[in-house]
Image (spheres, rainbow, N blue to C red):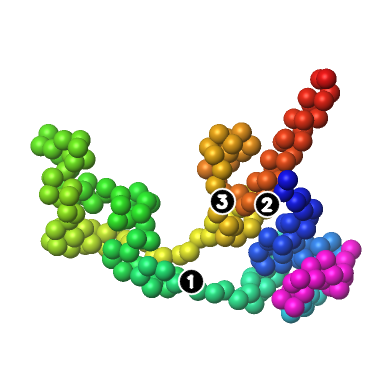
Amino acid sequence: MPVKMGKERTMRLACSLEHVLDECLSQLDTGEFGLEEVLARYPEREAELRPLLQTAMMVRQALRATPSPEATAVGRQRLLAAVARKVKKERAMCHDCGAMEGELHQFGCDMESCPYCGSQLISCGCCYDKLGLRNDRLYTKNTDFIQPEVYEHGLSEEQGRRWLEILEEKGRIPWIQYPNICAKCGALWPVMFAVPNEEWEKYVEPAMRGGMLCGSCYFWIKELIDQYAEEMTEDED
């Protein structure tokens, strides 16, 4: 039986700094809580939050002179932008080709996305279509309707050069690392785990099956559903 953590505690530990900041700002905006009260709710992140929220408090003071809804909305946007500038952003590096976020991958990197279909560039079939190499009258389904030599060995050097020109004309996609996120609690980079397809379909509703869940959330969902089913069975008896 998995250990069931309190929902509020689980979400606090999993949330990103930006999400926690937004929660703190919302609490401060109510006027019911002071800085120390808000910080006391997140002791594990007090050192990170204190300087950011102090900056936010200074901006809030300036907002009091313009209390109209429009001005308040604009001010809050500026407040969030000011806080965001203080949040340290680490620039990730592609593990395959060494490109930094915002840069183009080295051509042939397995992390580059195709600007036509959005799939992995080195494995999608867009190059065959754009180069006119696919022909269902000359070739069979066994070679995906392309020349057997190309199917077996890939593009020639000249074909690769032409494909790169086509991609650059279309606009290659700069690399940005988008993290895996738990669809339930928002945890970044949850540890991967596997369950049988039948079990996943039993406990995860259809609209969410294509997403990702962290282990804590999945087993909590499973426990809740099993617990309810057990209670219903007992009532019937």
Residue 208 lies, in percent from the top left, at 58, 41
The label on residue 193 is: 3
Left or right of residue 40, residue 97 in this image: left
Circle 3 residues within 10 Å: few <14, some 14–19, many ≥20 = few
Q: Quadrant of residue 221?
A: top right
Residue depicted at 14% across the width and 62% down the height: 157
State the residue position of label 1: 92
Q: Nearer the viewer, residue 179 or 114?
A: 179
Lower sequence index among marks 2 and 1: 1
State the residue position of label 2: 216
Residue depicted at 77% across the width and 53% down the height: 5
Q: Is residue 38 above or below residue 206?
A: below
Circle 1 residues within 10 Å: few <14, some 14–19, many ≥20 = some
Residue type, mark 2 in image? Ser
Q: Is residue 93 above or below residue 199?
A: below
The residues colored magenta run: 32-49
* Mark 2: secondary structure: helix
Circle 2 residues within 10 Å: few <14, some 14–19, many ≥20 = some
